Image (tube, rainbow, N blue to C red):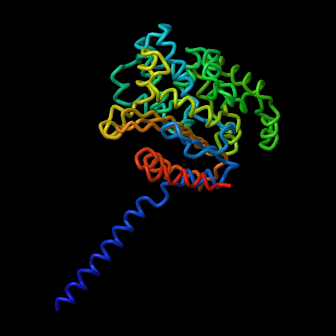
Amino acid sequence: MIKKIILGMVIIVVIAAAAGGYAIYSFFPEDDYVAQFALENPDKSAFLLIRNDTVIGQQNLHKQMPLASTLKLIIAVEFAEQVGQGLLNPEEKIAKKELLQFYVPNSDAGAHNNWSDSDDILKYGDSIPLISIAKGMMQYSSNANSEWLMERLGLKNINNQLTKLDFKDHSPIYPFVSSLFITKEYFKDKTEEELIQAIKNLSEEQYINYALDIHQKMLKDPDYSNQQLDLNETMQRIWSDRLPTGSVGDYVALMKKLNSKTYYDEKTQTVLHEIIETSMRYNSTKEFYKHIGIKSGSTLFIITKALYAEDHKGNKTEMAYFFNDLDAQERKKMTMFMKDFDRAVLRNPIMVQQIQKLYSTDE
């Protein structure tokens, strides 16, 4: 009888352990998906992870890839420096309607409206502090705020940041909201095939000049951005392929500067903290990190991200991963697993070791 009881208990324990093991596996099935995908798809990927000044894994360090909203980090740095130099008053009030000149309906997955309708912004009424516009660009990824800030800060000053930061692999930054209208403004009578070829044939300089011309039209005509746009997949692809490009090498170098907390003067650093490290206001974030900053970007074909963090044990992490030419299934999976990947990299030393081993055995 005792043997039967013991055998029954053993069976229960084994079943429970198996169930528990399955629960753990099912919850963390592909935490390394991002690193694995990058390794297996070098034509679509660039990846760099540094932990405590040690390169854990890297691929296509200098490959220029379309950045989407991750490039807003450069605008954020220019904003912070101008505040630090006393050129901008972060509390200056800006009429909310000014931003709508650069808002294109149905083009940002609701980012601008989510920011504009948030409690943090509604409390200001019709006029918003300049600092809140910069935070809306970073936290909510409002494209309208980004384009407005390009005008206010000066596009030349923003592009000069690329030189100041010693970036090696970055194309010029230009008004990418305005560029949505290039096909409609300059190639409206062409068939889809002719349009694709026409855009491909444009030099970088000509494409940027078109975007700059449209930017000025948007400034002068508040209704310009309300024009009906054809945003089908082909049109989005044309736009996505011509977005400003950069490399994980350059962006991780910037992450290291931000993570050091010593590269910029105190006033500039305070502004950078406020507009980039917006998640630090949550206790759930403070529980794990002394500081953390993240900026991501996406289109139908692109997913990019750059981040830095320091945990309470003093471990410092800088990472960037850029993906392009993703198909619908790849993009869906990447969106599903990237947050779990980030969390595992930042909190689980075993994941860092796993990635290091994964990349060290790559031939």
Quarter occupied by the N terminus: bottom left
Q: Nearer the viewer, residue 319 or 147?
A: 319
Residue 68 percent location from the top left of the image:
60, 35
Q: Nearer the viewer, residue 138 or 264?
A: 264
Query: Is residue 111 placed above or below 155 in the rendered structure?
Result: below
Query: Is residue 360 placed above or below 281 in the rendered structure?
Result: below
Residue 305 percent location from the top left of the image:
54, 39
> Which residue lies at the image location 82% right of the left edge and 34% below the top edge?
201
> Which residue lies at the image location 61% right of the left edge and 50% below the top edge?
38
> Which residue lies at the image location 37% right of the left edge and 68% below the top edge?
21
| 208 left or right, relative to 310 | right
Q: Nearer the viewer, residue 361 or 235?
A: 361
Quarter occupied by the C terminus: bottom right
| 283 left or right, relative to 295 | left
Residue 347 percent location from the top left of the image:
40, 46
Q: Quadrant of residue 157?
A: top right
